[in-house]
Amino acid sequence: AEAGPQGAQRLAAVATVAPEGAGAGGGIPVRGFVRGAESAAVPRAAVTLISLAGRQLGRSVAQADGAYTIDAPGAGSYVLIASADG
């Protein structure tokens, strides 16, 4: 992780698509972990899934270990954004 504008920290959001089956919201579950400096978990990070056109498709908040799950509407390419205070 590196310092960004105004001292913000760049986060790494790592995602994997769950094998087979739909998630609770009827989409394809995307699961991962938000990590900061030295791979430390970032609890309470906001994770947002958007389309390539910029439309918000899903949102989640990372748990204490940095884990999150968001349902994607289907197979395809998306943008995943993670942000957190501090």
Image (spheres, grey):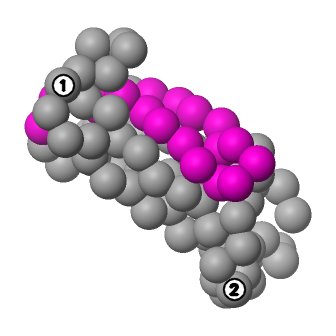
Residue positioned most to the front: 20
- What residue do we see at 73% from left, 60% from top? 42
Q: Is residue 35 left or right of residue 16?
A: right
Numbered disc 1: secondary structure? loop
- What residue do we see at 83% from left, 55% from top? 85
Q: Which mark is residue 38?
A: 2
Specify whether residue 35 is painted magenta: no
Q: Which residues are magenta?
A: 58-75
> Residue 15: x, y in percent?
38, 55
- What residue do we see at 65% from left, 54% from top? 66
Q: Is residue 73 visible?
A: no
Numbered disc 2: secondary structure? helix
Q: Which mark is residue 21?
A: 1
Mark 2–mark 1 distance (CA, rounded to whole Å): 34 Å
Q: Nearer the viewer, residue 6 or 85?
A: 85
Q: Is residue 60 left or right of residue 49?
A: right
First reached walking from the N terminus: tag 2 or tag 1: 1
- What residue do we see at 70% from left, 43% from top? 63
Other residues around mark 2 within 10 Å, as few (<14) / some (14–19) / many (≥20): few
Dividing the picture into quadrants, the one containing residue 9 is bottom right
Would you place residue 26 above or below residue 50 in this image? above
Where is the C terminus found, in terms of image quarters? bottom right
* Three-letter amino acid code at the position of disc 1: Gly
> Residue 83: x, y in percent?
66, 54
Mark nearer the viewer, 2 or 1: 1
Q: Is residue 79 visible?
A: yes
Would you place residue 84 above or below residue 69 in this image? below
* Three-letter amino acid code at the position of disc 2: Glu
Dividing the picture into quadrants, the one containing residue 57 is top left
Q: Is residue 73 left or right of residue 38?
A: left
> Residue 8: x, y in percent?
77, 71
